[in-house]
Structure formats: structure tokens, C-alpha cells
């Protein structure tokens, strides 16, 4: 936030922008973009408010420095955001640039990838630590496992991406480079424990392997394989399973037995594993016939989700005929 003031009329926005010391952060050598958003603002036209803010910034710089920045809406050096509420205008300078959840390694394809910061958050909530094996049996483009590898190796999440502040006037490029070099030198070389991902779709596995390299990790950092969650065995001794399985009606229609069969496989081959599943399907524990130890509310973008945590504590497994009225359906592993 760079300035704030009362705003009853559009001219108040101009005055606020005009009296903000923009020359500290950018000048005519930078390009500029201004965006406006509002909640309960009495102003008639946000477009006009945006224009008044832009005029205030440009007039201020022209009066101070003899030249004004030009406008570039596609790839500006400086991004200013104007926010209006019932009575106030606030001006912000964007120091991030691209959204902060973007680490700079993701290939922009793949069906329904989870955001990088959500993947890191799921790992933290799951209780996984880098000394334990980790498995994602529905790994898609590999986000959860690649984030886990970065956490385990101590890779700073922003190391591979540009930030908005790098294009501003007071940016100390040399100091920034030194900081990045120091952080890079502290990255561990080897992982202590196996990270494994399976996906039934070979194209998703290819994407995951490509993302691994884009994240500056070696091919052996994560073992990505084509595999069916319903039939895979545990790849190593018990550890953590953290996953974001498919959801939605189309998916359910395509593979109606997926949950029944996956849960049978979990009960048979994953004794001792800590299973963490994020889904928007709140009926999933019932379909898996597992009782969650915890259910943590989370949002995946705008989607209201739960992280269900199950402990596969006992290997005892009996195949029972499937009936919807089966009272054992909700009891889970005993
Ligand atoms: C929601 S996506 C996972 C996205 C992933 N977290 C990412 O960030 O890219 C679900 C994945 O489950 C995979 N899948 C569906 N059925 C499967 C099965 N039976 N076994 C393994 N993977 C399966 C799909 O191919 C899809 O890639």
C-alpha cells in the first residue's frame, strides 16, 4: 500500500495519486498499468476512476521529472492497483508480478492441476516430513511430489520466478542476485527418502516428468510411473500418501467402481500408511468405507473442499459383498 485517502468524488482519486511519491519506485523509463476494483463504492464509472488515477500518477511524474511513463497493458514494468470502498481510495504498488502461487516451473497443461501453494499446504497439514516416504497415486502433472521435493531439499519457493519488484527503480539487482546465490548454495543435493507418483494416464506422467526437470530437479528425484491406483502395491515401507484424486460427475460416470476398488487396495496393501485426500466430494469417506481421523476445510480455488485424513492402521482385510446398506461402510480400518 503506498497511499490512502477519502474519496467522495473522482477528483479525490486524482489528488491522492498526484500527491503520492511515485518517483521513489518508477519514472518515465518504466511502463505503467493501472487497474481498479471496488466494493460498495459510490463512484459511477470505475473506468473513469482508473483514468483519474493514471492521470494523477503521470502528472506527478511529469511535474517532478519532466517526463511521464507510457502505458503498457500487456507487460508493464510497474503495476498500480486502485481499490475503492464506500469512502476511501487506496493505491497499491504490485511488487509480486505473477500470482505468488506460481513458482515458475509448471508447464501450463494437464487436467485440473492443483496450485503449487495448495500442494505445499496439504503436505504441511498432512504431517509429512522429508524423512518419510511419500506417495501420490493420482499424481497428474506431479505438483504435490515436486513441491515435496523442493521442501525436502530446501529450495526457496520463488527461486525460479521473476518478481514485479525486480523491474522497479529502487531494486538492488546485485544484492538480489547474491541472496539467490546464497539460497541456491544452501539447497541439499540428495533426498533422504523415496517420493513416488502414479497416474493411469501416460500423458500426465510425461507432463510430471517434464515438470520435474523444469523445477531443476534430477530425473531420479521423484519416481513417476504409469499405474492404476486400484492395483498398485506400496512402493516402500509405510509413509504418507497425499493426493488430489479425480472428482466430478463425468469422472464418476466413467469409473463408478474407482473408490470401492481403490479403498480395497489401500486396505490390502497400505497398512500403516497415513492417507490424506483432498476432494470436493464430501461423501468420499463413505464411498471409500473409511472413517476419517480428521476432516480439514480447504478451498481449491473457489471449490469448497475437505482434506480427509485416514490412518490405515490394520492390514486385516476381508472382501465383502457390496451393498449400500452395509453398516460396515462407515467404520473404516479397525
Ligand atoms: C485431479 S487430477 C490430479 C492433479 C494433480 N494433483 C496435479 O497437480 O496435476 C487426477 C488425476 O488422477 C488420474 N487418475 C484417474 N483415475 C486413476 C486411476 N485409477 N489410477 C491412477 N490415476 C488415475 C487422472 O489421470 C488425473 O491425472
Image (spheres, grey):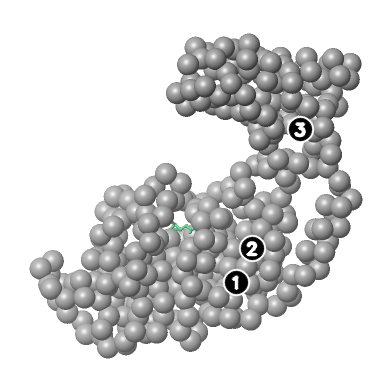
Report the number of discs: 3
Q: Residue at x 13, y 66 (%)?
A: 324
Q: Residue at x 83, y 42 (%)?
A: 171
- Earlier sequence position, callout 3 versus callout 2: 3
- Residue annotated with mark 1: 222
For this view, does 70 lie left or right of residue 315?
right
Q: Nearer the viewer, mark 1 or mark 3?
A: 3
Give coordinates of residue 125: x percent, y percent: 47, 66
- Earlier sequence position, callout 2 versus callout 1: 2
Q: Residue at x 59, y 16 (%)?
A: 49
Callout 3: 10 Å neighbours few (<14), some, many (20+)?
many
CB contact under 8 Å: marks 2 and 1:
yes
User: Quarter of the image holding residue 282?
Assistant: bottom left
- Residue annotated with mark 3: 77
Above or below residue 215? Residue 292 is below
Q: Secondary structure at mark 1?
A: loop
Amino acid at each position: 500500500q503506498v497511499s490512502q485517502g477519502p474519496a467522495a468524488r473522482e477528483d479525490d482519486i486524482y489528488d491522492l495519486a498526484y500527491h503520492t511519491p511515485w518517483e521513489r519506485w518508477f519514472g518515465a523509463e518504466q511502463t505503467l498499468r493501472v487497474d481498479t476494483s471496488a466494493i460498495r463504492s459510490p463512484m459511477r464509472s470505475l473506468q473513469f476512476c482508473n483514468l483519474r488515477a493514471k492521470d494523477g500518477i503521470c502528472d506527478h511524474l511529469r511535474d517532478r521529472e519532466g517526463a511521464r511513463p507510457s502505458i503498457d497493458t500487456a507487460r508493464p514494468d510497474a503495476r498500480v492497483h486502485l481499490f475503492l470502498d464506500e469512502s476511501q481510495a487506496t493505491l497499491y504498488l504490485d511488487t509480486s508480478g505473477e500470482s505468488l502461487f506460481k513458482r515458475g516451473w509448471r508447464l501450463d497443461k494437464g487436467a485440473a492441476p492443483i496450485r503449487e501453494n495448495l500442494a505445499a499446504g496439504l503436505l504441511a497439514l498432512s504431517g509429512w516430513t522429508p524423512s518419510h516416504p511419500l506417495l501420490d497415486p493420482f499424481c497428474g502433472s506431479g505438483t504435490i511430489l515436486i513441491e515435496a521435493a523442493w521442501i525436502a531439499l530446501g529450495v526457496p519457493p520463488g527461486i525460479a520466478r521473476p518478481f514485479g519488484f525486480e523491474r522497479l527503480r529502487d531494486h538492488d539487482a546485485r544484492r538480489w542476485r547474491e541472496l539467490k546465490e546464497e539460497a541456491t548454495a544452501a539447497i541439499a543435493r540428495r533426498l533422504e527418502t523415496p517420493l513416488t507418483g502414479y497416474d493411469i494416464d501416460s500423458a500426465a506422467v510425461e507432463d510430471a516428468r517434464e515438470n520435474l526437470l523444469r523445477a531443476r530437479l534430477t530425473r531420479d528425484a521423484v519416481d513417476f510411473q504409469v499405474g492404476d491406483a486400484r492395483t498398485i502395491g506400496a512402493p516402500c515401507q509405510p509413509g504418507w500418501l497425499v493426493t488430489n484424486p479425480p472428482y466430478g460427475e463425468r469422472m464418476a460416470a466413467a469409473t463408478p467402481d474407482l473408490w470401492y476398488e481403490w479403498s480395497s487396495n489401500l486396505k490390502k496393501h497400505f497398512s500403516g500408511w497415513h492417507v490424506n485426500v483432498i476432494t470436493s466430494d464430501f461423501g468420499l469417506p463413505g464411498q471409500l468405507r473409511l472413517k476419517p481421523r480428521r476432516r480439514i476445510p480447504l478451498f481449491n480455488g473457489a471449490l469448497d473442499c475437505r482434506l480427509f485424513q485416514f490412518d490405515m492402521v490394520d492390514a486385516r482385510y476381508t472382501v465383502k459383498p457390496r451393498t449400500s446398506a452395509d453398516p460396515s461402510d462407515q467404520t473404516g480400518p479397525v
